[in-house]
Image: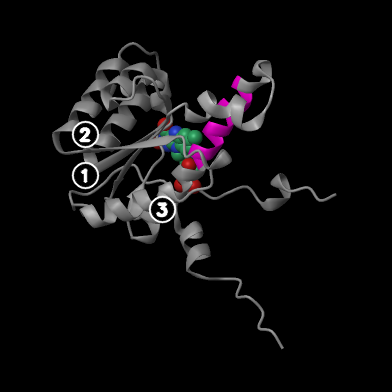
Amino acid sequence: MSEKPSLTNPTLETIRRRHSIRQFSEEAVSEEEIKTILEAANQAPSAHNQQSWHFVVVRGDKRLELSELVVEKSRDYPKPSSSLLRMAARSIASAPVTIAVANTGDLIEHGTELFKVEREVAFDFFRTMEIQSSAAAVENLLLAATSLGLASVWLGVLFLIKEEVLDFLGEPGGEFMAVIPIGHALKESSGPSKKSLEYAVRRL
Ligand SMILES: Cc1cc2nc3c(=O)[nH]c(=O)nc-3n(C[C@H](O)[C@H](O)[C@H](O)COP(=O)(O)O)c2cc1C
């Protein structure tokens, strides 16, 4: 008789444990931990296996520069955007490492040939698939960090200042996906509760 698969395991536990943390302690993150997290991100599924993502590791003085850039640019925005940008800047400054994710446009560039679809529909299709692929990479990255006992948060609000952020990252031709400070949680928290499945699931 075959054994029933367990309904809990380390992967599911990590998924349940992950939640956004926005303030970090001064405790360092090792190069091995960063490499492990990047390998997990790079392992994600991607449309046509194009892996059309770049991961940019921002440490040391560079993360403070990035944080200052965000504070400076926040002044161009009204509340609450400016407050959210400043909150993001504080997360970046307090985390020992930040990893940014930018789409390369490789799928957009090669897609028409790879998929044999009309040029008119191609751009929307490939851009969406690049975003979807990179989102899978970001989730892998967040889960890998959680599995190593590290905390993280996906900062999407930097999209508002994406040109400046992409320039800073050395990815001026890329598309902004995410900026993710990673470190040890300043204090533990359990994260927000989620809507029950009955809101999200329909069965046909
Ligand atoms: C695409 C995306 C963008 C996000 N942008 C921000 C952000 O700019 N600032 C922030 O503090 N949290 C951001 N978050 C984190 C969400 O606020 C968080 O995931 C949500 O409140 C659920 O909490 P949890 O991650 O703890 O489960 C973002 C999450 C996603 C998926």
Q: Residue furthest toward the top?
A: 76
Q: Which residue is mark 3?
A: 40
Q: Which residue is more in the foreground, 85 or 15? A: 15
Query: Which portion, as a residue range, is magenta?
Result: 123-135
What's the residue at 18%, 32% (across, down)?
62
Percent coordinates x, y for residue 177 in the rendering: 44, 31
Q: Which residue is more in the foreground, 64 or 23? A: 64
What's the residue at 35%, 48% (across, down)?
38
Q: Callout 1: few (<14), some (14-19), or many (20+) C-alpha neighbours within 10 Å?
A: many
What's the residue at 53%, 42% (across, down)?
49
Q: Quadrant of residue 60?
A: top left
CB of mark 1 within 8 Å of CB of mark 2?
yes
Sequence-first tag of 3 and 1: 3
Q: Callout 2: few (<14), some (14-19), or many (20+) C-alpha neighbours within 10 Å?
A: many
Mark 2 residue type: Arg
Q: Quadrant of residue 128?
A: top right
Q: How far is disc 3 from disc 2 in space, using C-alphas?
A: 22 Å
Residue 185 visible (yes or no): no
Q: Which mark is residue 96?
A: 1
Sequence-first tag of 3 and 2: 3
Please name which of the two marks, 3 or 1, marks the residue nearer to the observer. 3
**Ligand 1 closer than 8 Å to label 3 CB:** no
Mark 1 residue type: Pro
CB of mark 3 within 8 Å of CB of mark 2?
no
Percent coordinates x, y for residue 104 in the rendering: 43, 29
